[in-house]
Image: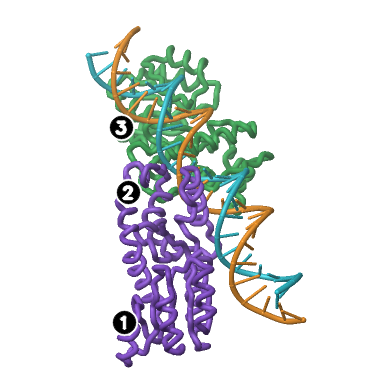
Chain colours: A purple, B green, C orange, D cyan
DNA sequence: ATCTAAATGGTAATCGTTATCATTAAGCGG
DNA sequence: CCGCTTAATGATAACGATTACCATTTAGAT
């Protein structure tokens, strides 16, 4: 599960809270620097969202005190250039402004993640090859023999890694038909693919399920 | 296997011979009354085709000597009204003239068959009912539980009984896709349906295969 | 008549889908 | 925070259409 820490005084952050939760993140929200530090020491965070509305000194502390390479995104007033510059000078990795677009936030997180992790994803990508003829995926030293639909599902998810792909989208783009109210076929293909992953000593959650939304691929 | 006896002197009947064979009939051809009588006593004939070009006395004998209710169709010169009248007076069931259209011949055979057998087919029809909801066919006292495709295949053939239905036609009308060069799916559905027929003590050849042409339903 | 190639019959494997039930997570009222 | 209800998901197995494969039959050629 991916954890995100939000440090914000505003009640309006509830909206952001729910949207991120819906995207599969486990969101922790605090409203002071102390609680934030506790969370930072306790959890492995995917990212930290810091609203600059918290007292400047606290913000400063936070940015200095962080030991990890966890990306910090500051929520600043876009019209207040001073805040933006301050944020970056204090060590923030990026900044956003209200209202926060969840989609944009996710994209920036992906960019930061790739940057901060070196290029782990790129390395991984080089160790993954797709054999369209035999519906086989080779990752590192394992090779996954899939059926045609499993293969195309897996490949589609892989090519959209980091994003949450809707079931409706998968049904349309991979199976070429509409998603019915009670269709479970996708779940079955995912389930079977995960079983094959497990049998190859690979993590089942290479394919992550985002309840109510769809699935996402991630290393 | 349906047997047909042709009594003809002409070599040109070879054409007719092949066409009927192609339609699934087993065709016996003789050129004299004696051989014809032997065949008539040996086989259960579907029909007899008598070319009036054979000596009048032989034709007369044949028509008189036949014990069975096997329909006799005389091949007469359409322009020779005398022959036509003679044929019917002598007891022929119908007449045709050269060149013989196989399709027309089949239709006339169907008519004669239904007439001669009383209305067995009609009786049968009354004992056959289709349950579209459960893909089940009830004939007389047996009930055939089929799968959806088996059911639709069976019903389509039933509704076209007497005709030879092409595989291409079945594939298009029942399965809604084109018939590929090496497709065997129809054969399998037919095979499985026949097995269910056999399990219900019903004749497998209710569905007749016409090699190279397709299948036909007949009681 | 014998031989070859195509057509057909039939058993079994493959795979997509559906049925069914167990498990999990979110929402809700206390 | 706690138990309840309901929808979403995981997973085993049944089901059914298609395909693979091999045996058998048949038409046509030599």
Please tell me which residue is depicted at 37% across the width and 32% down the height of the picture: B212
Image point (38%, 16%), residue name: B30
Disc ID at residue B77: none
Question: Where in the figure is residue A122, as x and y percent of width and height?
Answer: 30, 57
Gap in Å between the C-alphas at discs 1 and 2?
Answer: 37 Å
Residue A179 image position (x, y, % from top left):
47, 63
Q: In this view, does B118 lie above or below A75?
A: above
Provide the residue designation for mark 3.
Answer: B98
- Which quadrant of the figure contains the C terminus of chain A? bottom left
| Front residue of B5 and B69 | B5
Cα distance in 3D space between marks 1 and 3: 104 Å
Kindly identify which residue carries mark 1.
A89
Q: Is mark 3 on a helix, strand or loop?
A: loop
Q: Are marks 1 and 3 on the same chain?
A: no
Front residue of this view, candidates A143 and B202: A143
Task: Give the distance between the C-alpha atoms of the residues marked 3 and 2, in whole angstroms.
Answer: 76 Å
Could you tell me which chain the residue with mark 1 belongs to? A
Residue B199 place in picture, x, y as percent: 63, 32
Q: Residues within 10 Å of mark 2 (few under 14, many from 20)?
A: few
- Name the residue that disc number 2 marks: A127
The percent coordinates of residue B135 (x first, y second) are 59, 48
Please report, as a chain letter, where disc 3 is located: B
Q: Is residue C19 above or below residue B63?
A: below
Which is in the foreground here, disc 1 or disc 2? 1
Please determine whether, in this image, residue B41 is positioned above or below residue B12. Answer: above
Mark 3 surroundings: few (<14), some (14-19) or many (≥20) residues within 10 A: few
Q: Do the residues labelled 1 and 2 touch (CB within 8 Å)?
A: no
Q: How many labels does the image show?
A: 3
Q: Is residue B219 left or right of residue B32?
A: right
SS at mark 2 in the image: loop
* Quadrant assignment, res A144: top left
Q: Residue at x 64, y 34 (%)?
A: B200
């Amino acid at each position: 599960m991916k954890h995100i820490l939000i440090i914000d005084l505003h009640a309006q952050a509830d909206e952001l809270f729910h949207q991120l939760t819906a995207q599969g993140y486990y969101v922790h929200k605090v409203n002071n620097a102390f609680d934030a530090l506790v969370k930072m020491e306790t959890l492995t965070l995917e990212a930290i969202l810091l609203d600059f509305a918290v007292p400047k000194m606290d913000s400063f502390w936070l940015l200095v005190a962080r030991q990890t390479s966890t990306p910090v995104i500051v929520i600043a007033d876009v019209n207040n250039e001073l805040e933006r510059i301050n944020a970056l000078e204090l060590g923030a990795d990026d900044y956003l402004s209200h209202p926060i677009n969840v989609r944009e936030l996710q994209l920036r997180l992906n960019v930061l993640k790739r940057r901060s992790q070196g290029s782990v994803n790129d390395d991984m990508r080089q160790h993954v090859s797709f054999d369209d003829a035999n519906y086989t995926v080779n990752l590192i030293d394992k090779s996954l023999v899939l059926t045609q639909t499993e293969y195309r599902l897996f490949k589609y998810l892989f090519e959209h890694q980091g994003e949450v792909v809707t079931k409706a989208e998968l049904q349309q783009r991979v199976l070429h038909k509409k998603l019915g109210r009670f269709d479970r076929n996708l779940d079955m293909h995912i389930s079977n693919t995960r079983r094959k992953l497990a049998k190859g000593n690979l993590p089942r959650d290479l394919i992550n399920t985002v309840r109510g939304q769809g699935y996402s691929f991630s290393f």
